[in-house]
Amino acid sequence: MVEKDSSLFTGAVATSLALVLSVAEPTITHAYISPSSDVVAQYGTSMVVDEDAQAKFMREREQMAQTYDADTEGTYSSAEQTESKKATYTIAVGGLIAVAFLAPMLQFFYYTGGD
């Protein structure tokens, strides 16, 4: 009997919570954004920006533009450095490929006993 009462109580609480949430209207109380002093509303829908404020913004934006050094040096290796190390890289890659083919074959023959 206790189990039936608790399930009835839980159902009543869930139903009342669902009713409250479905009827409630959410209100946003802290989302007010004050209009900027540089913007003037005209005829209710169109916005006109103050020309002086826009010119000031463009000047500040030009000052913030990123500048690059013209005499930067590249970080790539030269052709001579690449050619001098080519043999080393060829041996290393060839060795890895050989191990990749030979190791599975050796494992197969080891586990099967050469059958």
Image (cartoon, grey):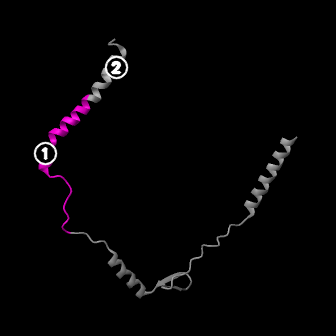
Q: Which mark is residue 108?
A: 2
Residue located at (42% from left, 85% from top): 53
Residue nearer the viewer, 22 or 74: 74
Q: Position of residue 75 (x, y in %)?
A: 21, 56
Q: Circle 2 sits in a helix, a strand or a loop, which is it?
A: helix
Q: Position of residue 24 (x, y in %)?
A: 73, 64
Query: Which corner quadrant holds the N terminus?
Result: top right
Reading the image, the residue beneath label 1 is: 83
Magenta range is: 70-98
Q: Amino acid at mark 1?
A: Glu
Q: Circle 1 sits in a helix, a strand or a loop, which is it?
A: helix
- In the image: residue 12, left or right of residue 44: right
Residue located at (83% from left, 41% from top): 3
Q: Amino acid at mark 2?
A: Phe
Q: Is the residue 79 above or below the residue 90 in the image?
A: below
Q: Position of residue 58 (x, y in %)?
A: 36, 80
Q: Is the residue 15 above or below the residue 53 in the image?
A: above
Residue nearer the viewer, 29 or 46: 29
Asked whether 71 falls inside the magenta stretch, the response is yes
Residue located at (79% from left, 49% from top): 10
* Occupied quadrant, residue 29: bottom right
- In the image: residue 90, left or right of residue 24: left
Residue located at (73% from left, 60% from top): 22
Residue nearer the viewer, 50 or 107: 107
**Distance CA(mark 2)–CA(mark 1):** 39 Å
Question: Which secondary structure is most common in the magenta stretch?
Answer: helix
